[in-house]
Image (cartoon, grey):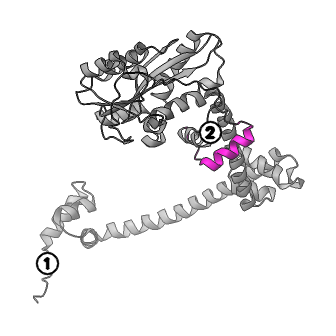
Amino acid sequence: MSKKTRRRFSQQYKSMAVAMHREKGYSKVDVARRLGIQRSMVERWERQLFPEAGEKANAQQEESKVADEKDREIQRLREENRKLLEEKEVLKKANGLLRQRAELKYRFIAAEEANHSIALMCRVLHASRSGYYDWARRERMDLARGLQVEAVKALHRAKRGRLGTRRMARELRKQGHMVGRHRARSLMQEAGVVCQQRRRFKATTDSRHAHAIAPNLLQRNFEVDAPNIAWVADITAIWTFSGWVYLAAVLDLYDRQIVGWSVAHHMRAELATDALQMAIERRRPAPGLLHHSDRGSQYASDAYRNALGAAGMVPSMSRKGDCWDNAVMERFFGTLKSEWTDARRYRTRQEAIDDVAQFIEWEYNAARGHTSLDDLTPIEKQLTAAA
């Protein structure tokens, strides 16, 4: 292995390097970097060429050291005096708390935390720092629980008393409260609220007709990977003091969005066709979409089948008397009633119609997260497909 050659520098080179610092104003670091040498070499050459500069620098360094020590001592005394004054101020504010129980001291410390250090106040008041932090943690937990209870009460009012423990937990998480179903149940008990139950039922399916019945092509395959692949449709009844009103709805299985709906005081075929036409105008689906419904006379009618044919849709119908073949739509109707309409007492049919429309477009499609959609709303799910 070859031996590393030690660099040698002429006296002229050394003078040039020192002159760059002393005459041209470059720092020793800049000179060393520019010439590719160590800073210590520039300093050593300067001491060799200008001995008096080294002696002067040493003297200045010693004077600076003495001055620094004096400054540090002055600073120490000032800091000590500041602490004494602050301790005096804390004692003055505490006004006799030294003999009081720990909780009163802790409350004072919490109130003054922005003005004085916790360590100083604990020392002056003879309070345990660890005890204070434990107390503060418990206070934060109590405050958080109190806020959660108030949030539960507000959600219970806003959702008309129709939130069970699962949906209550989900709505609380949306607001930033990290709670699970069991914590939600505990909070609901503390808030004194319970989920209201569903009420009266009216049959809406009349399969006693002579119209043709389509085969069950859906076969309960409720999961699809894109919008406008499969829709489901059904009709439900809602009670008012003026009589029943009927909702026909069309739901896209991909994003669970109600893409078409119609509400009226009758169950004639046009109720269902109006909902279908709204869905077609809103989504403009390509031919081949699978449309599933029950065997009701509205969906088996010539008018409805003609509308399906004109849109290029393939009809599918549930087996006789089997509501599970259309379970997703049944689930929507259950949600509508348990979370919205059953808590109301509609005086008129129009009042119910307006309220149902609000639920579908404002609450269900746009604001209500779905477990099956990873807590996305139907509209949010639709947007992910369009992205």
Q: Position of residue 306 (x, y in %)?
A: 29, 18
User: For mark 2, does the 10 Å Cα neighbourhood hold few (<14), some (14 to 19), or many (20 or more) residues?
Assistant: some
Q: Residue at x 34, y 69 (%)?
A: 54
Residue farthest front in this picture: 210
Q: Which amino acid type is marked by label 2?
A: Gly
Residue 124 placement, left or right of 167: right
Q: Quadrant of residue 197?
A: top right
Q: Which amino acid type is marked by label 1?
A: Arg
Of residue 154 and residue 120, the one placed in the foreground of this image is 154
Q: Residue at x 31, y 18 (%)?
A: 281
Q: Is 190 part of what is drawn in magenta?
A: yes
Q: Which residue does the numbered mark 2 point to in the structure image?
A: 164
Callout 2 secondary element: loop
Tell me if residue 368 comes above or below residue 72 in the rendering: above
User: For mark 1, does the 10 Å Cα neighbourhood hold few (<14), some (14 to 19), or many (20 or more) residues?
Assistant: few
Q: Which residues are magenta?
A: 175-194
Task: Point out the tag, 1 or 2, that comes first from the N-terminus.
Answer: 1
Callout 1 secondary element: loop
